[in-house]
């Protein structure tokens, strides 16, 4: 039986409480979250257990991953491809960077963005004639794209 079923049962039955020995810091964190969400402490614990069970059962199912985890993964893949391209602007690294840009367009933003277009243009220039100036510009644009990823994935519904 999963946590959601347990939760539904708890809502319809008389609750029997028990004591659990946990570190004081953990109890304080649960208190803080419960106050912040204005719910009982046991609901915070139940949500955490439910999330944990889902992650254990379906670790590869992308929809079950927390948004922060997905965000970190896309940023890691994008940053790695930018770094590899700047280090060695060969065809393979160009292709990898192009794939990450296309992935961000479709999976994260759902459209082309000005920053992605700018990165595309700068990468073409850098591939033809690598320079420190272009490397700095690519790094600056990459930072802006990472900022957009964070805003899109963590702060937009």
Image (spheres, rainbow, N blue to C red):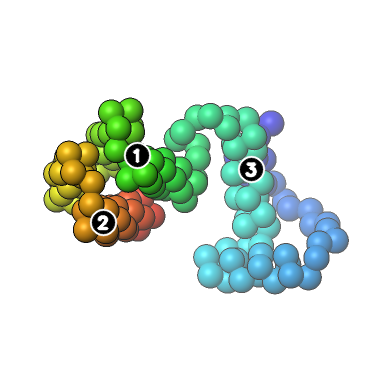
Q: Is residue 12 visible?
A: no
Q: Which mark is residue 126?
A: none
Q: Determine the image quadrant of residue 21.
A: bottom right
Judged left or right of residue 124, residue 101 is right
Q: Earlier in the sequence, mark 2 or mark 1?
A: 1
Which residue is tagged 1?
A: 88
Instruction: Name the residue at 74% across, 70% down.
Output: 25
**Closer to the camera in the image, 7 or 70:** 70
Q: Is residue 84 visible?
A: yes
Position of residue 84 measured from the top left corner of the image (x, y, whole percent): 38, 41
Judged left or right of residue 112, residue 13 is right
- Quarter of the picture holding the N terminus: top right
Position of residue 80 measured from the top left corner of the image (x, y, whole percent): 41, 43
Q: Determine the image quadrant of residue 43.
A: bottom right
Which residue is tagged 2?
A: 132
Instruction: Name the residue at 64% across, 34% down.
Output: 56
Marks 2/1: CA distance? 13 Å
Marks 3/1: CA distance? 40 Å
Between disc 3 and disc 2, the foreground one is 2
**Closer to the camera in the image, 33 or 71:** 71
Between disc 3 and disc 1, the foreground one is 1
Helix, strand or loop status at disc 3: helix
**Closer to the camera in the image, 19 or 149:** 149
Q: Residues within 10 Å of mark 2 (few under 14, many from 20)?
A: few
Which residue is tagged 3?
A: 52
Helix, strand or loop status at disc 2: helix
Report if the CB atoms under discs 2 and 1 are less than 8 Å apart.
no
Position of residue 7 measured from the top left corner of the image (x, y, whole percent): 63, 44
């Amino acid at each position: 039986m999963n946590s959601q079923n347990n939760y539904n049962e708890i809502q319809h039955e008389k609750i029997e409480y028990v004591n659990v020995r946990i570190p004081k810091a953990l109890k304080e964190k649960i208190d803080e979250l419960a106050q912040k969400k204005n719910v009982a402490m046991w609901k915070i614990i139940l949500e955490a257990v439910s999330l944990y069970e889902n992650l254990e059962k379906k670790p590869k199912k992308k929809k079950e991953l927390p948004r922060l985890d997905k965000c970190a993964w896309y940023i890691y893949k994008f940053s790695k491809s930018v770094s590899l391209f700047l280090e060695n602007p060969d065809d393979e690294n160009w292709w990898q960077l192009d794939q990450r840009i296309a992935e961000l367009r479709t999976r994260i933003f759902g459209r082309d963005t000005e920053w992605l277009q700018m990165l595309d243009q700068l990468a073409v220039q850098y591939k033809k004639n690598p320079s420190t100036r272009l490397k700095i510009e690519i790094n600056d644009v990459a930072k802006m794209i990472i900022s957009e990823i964070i805003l899109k994935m963590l702060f937009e519904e």
